[in-house]
């Protein structure tokens, strides 16, 4: 293959790349990986019945997931079956300890729509929450991501899943052994806080977030003595409200421009 052909193929892969994401998003949205959890191997017809979808469409979706390495496709005595790969079992079953299911569905339900307006974002120099939510731009972040209790829980679960995945790397990126207290601004469910107190036995962490987010936090909390070193501070606006005088861990400021942060 010539350099020109190789470069062209790379570009084609980039052009078509969104289709891979949408296959993953759809399979998670329809809970295909939940249907195949615990080592289940089912036919396309079986899966279609459980997810309330057409057999033809389900078979194509399952084959696409198999091509992406998310499912294993087997054939015995002329019968084709599908089962989760180790990757899917670990990260895509909704109730798994390391699940990213909530994060994937959040991208499907919200972020996908935002990126369809990327041209407008570039031309206007603004985010596109208002186009998705049909509300004022200044209120759009909250209104877009959790306009209802159900959407609020989905957003919270997505942030919890994402934070858990990278919590160890963040907690150990710097030596915090010299500190006795910390505050995680926009700390959501406290997933990072729990990792911090695991890594640093003398550290106490305060999680600062909106009251409606803090209200959901107990649903995500592990039990144990380490939890006693974590406190939650339901507040409103971390640009205006008084903050604890401690080390700050921020995983939220990327949602605002530099001049505001």
Image (cartoon, helix red, strand yellow):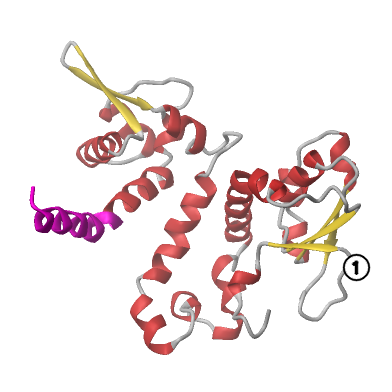
Residue 124 drawn above or below residue 158: below
User: Where residue 115 sits in the image (x, y, percent)?
Assistant: 39, 69
* Residue 4 falls within the magenta-colored stretch: yes
Q: Residue 206 vs residue 150: left or right?
A: right
Which residue sits at x=88%, y=35%?
Answer: 225
Q: Residue 155 vs residue 44: left or right?
A: right
Magenta segment's dominant SS is helix
| Outermost residue to the front | 3
Which residue sits at x=39%, y=50%?
Answer: 25
Number of on-image labels: 1
Q: Residue 163 vs residue 186: left or right?
A: left
Residue situated in front as seen by the camera: 85 or 109 = 85
Q: Mark 1 packing: few (<14 Cα in 10 Å), some, or many (20+)?
A: few
User: Where residue 123 sits in the image (x, y, percent)?
Assistant: 37, 87
User: Where residue 183 sits in the image (x, y, percent)?
Assistant: 82, 60
- Under tag 1, what secondary structure? loop
Residue 260 drawn above or below residue 42: below
Which residue sits at x=68%, y=50%?
Answer: 173
Which residue sits at x=67%, y=83%?
Answer: 260
Residue 82 drawn above or below residue 128: above
| Outermost residue to the top | 77
* Residue 147 falls within the magenta-colored stretch: no
Q: Quadrant of residue 16?
A: bottom left
**On-image quarter of the C terminus:** bottom right
Identify the residue under disc 1: 245
Q: Which residues are magenta?
A: 1-18
User: Where residue 41 sits in the image (x, y, percent)?
Assistant: 35, 21
């Amino acid at each position: 293959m010539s350099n020109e052909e190789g470069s062209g193929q790379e570009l084609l892969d980039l052009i078509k790349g969104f289709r891979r994401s949408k296959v993953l998003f759809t399979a998670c949205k329809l809970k295909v990986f939940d249907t195949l959890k615990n080592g289940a191997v089912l036919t396309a017809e079986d899966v279609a019945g459980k997810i309330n979808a057409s057999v033809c469409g389900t078979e194509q979706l399952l084959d696409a997931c198999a091509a992406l390495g998310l499912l294993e496709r087997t054939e015995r005595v002329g019968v084709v079956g599908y089962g989760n790969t180790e990757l899917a079992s670990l990260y895509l079953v909704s109730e798994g300890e390391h699940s990213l299911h909530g994060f994937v569905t959040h991208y499907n339900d919200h972020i996908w729509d935002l990126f369809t307006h990327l041209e407008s974002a570039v031309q206007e120099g603004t985010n596109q929450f208002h186009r998705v939510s049909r509300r004022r731009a200044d209120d759009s972040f909250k209104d877009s991501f959790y306009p209802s209790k159900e959407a609020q829980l989905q957003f919270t679960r997505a942030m919890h899943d994402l934070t858990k995945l990278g919590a160890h790397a963040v907690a150990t990126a710097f030596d915090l052994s010299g500190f006795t207290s910390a505050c995680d601004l926009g700390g959501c469910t406290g997933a990072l806080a729990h990792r911090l107190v695991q890594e640093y036995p003398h550290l106490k962490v305060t999680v600062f977030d909106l009251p409606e987010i803090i209200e959901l936090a107990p649903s995500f909390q592990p039990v144990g003595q380490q939890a006693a070193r974590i406190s939650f501070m339901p507040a409103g606006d971390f640009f205006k409200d008084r903050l604890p005088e401690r080390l700050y861990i921020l995983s939220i400021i990327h949602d605002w421009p530099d001049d505001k942060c």
